[in-house]
Image (cartoon, helix red, strand yellow):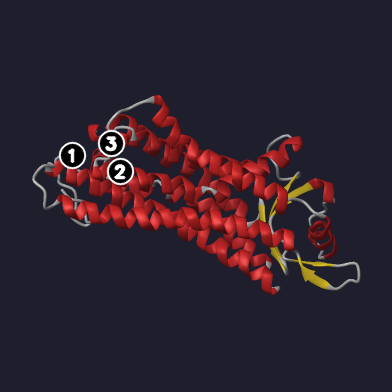
Amino acid sequence: MSTQRVVQFVCTPLAIITNCTLILFVLKKSPESLGLYKYLMIYIAVYELLFSTLDILLAPDAYSYDTIFIMITRADKLILPPCTKEVASMMFCVLFGESLAVFSIHFVYRYLAITGHSFLKTKSLRKTLIWLLIPVIYGFLWAVNLYCTLWVNTDTEQILQGNGYLRENKLNISDVTYIGPNYWKLDENRNEVINWRTMLGMSIASTLISISFAMIVIFATLSYKEVSKLTELTSHSEKFRSIQLQLLNSLVLQSLVPAFFIQLPSFVLFLAPFFHCGRPVFGEIIGVTVALYPVLDSLPTILVIKAFREAIFHCCPFTNKNATLPTSVALVTIQ
């Protein structure tokens, strides 16, 4: 069994435990001031549960070789009916790609909450659906782009058949489906030329990711500026300022997990094949980091938000229930 597969089997149960714990805390231990935001927190947790579950059910191979970097779903490793491998593979890659979009709307919401924007002052089903549907729309655009520009094609099939991947794994081309870029192809004269369809697809994907990343940076910066202003105002209670800073800190830390475990490695691995530098070991690395992501991503929220951290502390059988929390644990929060 490969290292990637071992990590998948270990991480999936851990991801289920950590994210279910977070959902339970959000429902039972959330401060009243969270309001609608607690449903967005649950949304992230459910998203990561789905991501981790698909990772174990599909057991995708992240494969990099020369000019390609693709996510391969194999019929012999699939824990689903073979007829579902195309749809399930697309769903996994859409979740993989829209992770930044999921977090960007949370930063927008945090900024609106801190500034007391009128949009959040009244609750309605319509407003809730707006927040929840934004990542879905983003994912739909991502799926259309993948299908039109980075889906199964004859040029990539020739590479898989010629480099020994199928032969070494005793597979036929009909046993696999894959999504990903192949930057170079051979023309009718057997000369290597740029695959412009792939370049278009990667340009669209990069644009979608850049928009989400820019929103995170902009609204995180604005939110920290607004939180710093709250300390100068007497109209807000210390409790309000504290929970706003805790939520913002937890969201920043939570966003760093996919940034370092998915987006940054993916950027390097998507860029390398353009220079004919794709290597199988690169794919193995991203396969491991993708499996670790849903396990680690919920931990910042559990540990930074005081109400959740105290629930963990008091549930632990080895702690003194009357003791105060260590200062080091509460470093990033206002007590």
Residues under labels 2 and 1: Cα distance?
A: 37 Å
Q: Secondary structure at mark 2?
A: helix
Residue 183 horizontal side relative to residue 129, left or right: right
Residue on which disc 3 sits: 118
Q: Where does residue 300 sit, x and y in percent of width and height?
A: 35, 50
Q: Residues within 10 Å of mark 3 (few under 14, many from 20)?
A: few
Q: Nearer the viewer, residue 115 or 251?
A: 115
Residue 271 horizontal side relative to residue 85, left or right: left
Q: Nearer the viewer, residue 70 or 13?
A: 70
Q: Residues within 10 Å of mark 2 (few under 14, many from 20)?
A: some
From where the camera sits, is residue 280 visible?
A: yes
Of mark 2 and mark 1, the one earlier in the sequence is 2
Residue on which disc 1 sits: 321
Residues under labels 3 and 2: Cα distance?
A: 8 Å
Q: Quadrant of residue 287?
A: bottom right
Residue kind at label 3, given as amino acid type: Ser
Q: Residue, x 56% and y 50% (percent of image)?
A: 97
Q: Residue, x 49% and y 55% (percent of image)?
A: 211
Residue on which disc 2 sits: 112
